[in-house]
């Protein structure tokens, strides 16, 4: 976790994309940092924080399910914004990990083709 001064130093060196893994931390840091860079959420996002994330971030790199995708879509429409996302895939299948289950997704796709 980087503090605001460290992030400012990175921005002064030409870094244009900053990642944060907690919505609460971004909420604290974003007002102090201003603009001029892209702010990415790289950690898990709970659906109840989607509206806040929509306001704070320029991209969500941890979309882990359809319910969250629908919530982000609703919040983006309300904000008049497009939110780029990256899909997080749980390739290990471990229940303790976040992400779309790649095998379940494959089975669903195959079933829907019948």
Image (spheres, rainbow, N blue to C red):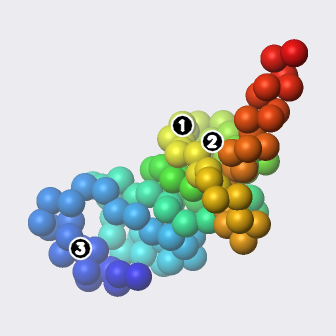
- Ranked by sequence position, the earlier of labels 3 and 1 is 3
Disc 1 is placed on an element classified as loop
- Residue sitting at x 50%, y 60%: 41
Image x and y of residue 74, in percent: 72, 41
Image x and y of residue 20, in percent: 45, 68
As drawn, is 21 to the left or to the right of 68? left
**Residue occupied by mark 3:** 8
Q: Are the residues flagged by discs 3 and 2 in contact, CB closer than 8 Å?
A: no
Image x and y of residue 49, in percent: 69, 63
**Residue occupied by mark 1:** 82
What's the CA distance linking mark 3 and mark 2? 28 Å
**Residue occupied by mark 2:** 76
Quadrant placement of the C terminus: top right
Q: Are the residues flagged by discs 2 and 1 in contact, CB closer than 8 Å?
A: yes
- Ranked by sequence position, the earlier of labels 2 and 1 is 2
Q: Which mark is residue 21?
A: none
Residue at the limit of the structure toward the left, as seen here: 13
Q: Camera-side residue: 68 or 90?
A: 90
- Ranked by sequence position, the earlier of labels 3 and 2 is 3
């Amino acid at each position: 976790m980087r503090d605001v001064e460290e992030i400012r130093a990175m921005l002064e060196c030409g870094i244009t994309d900053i990642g944060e893994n907690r919505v609460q931390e971004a909420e604290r840091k974003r007002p102090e940092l201003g603009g001029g860079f892209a702010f990415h959420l790289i950690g898990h996002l709970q659906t109840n924080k989607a509206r806040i994330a929509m306001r704070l971030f320029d991209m969500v790199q941890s979309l882990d399910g359809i319910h969250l995708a629908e919530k982000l879509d609703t919040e983006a429409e309300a904000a008049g914004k497009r939110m780029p996302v990256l899909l997080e895939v749980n390739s290990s299948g471990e229940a303790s990990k976040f992400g779309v289950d790649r095998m379940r997704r494959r089975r669903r796709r195959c079933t829907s083709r019948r």
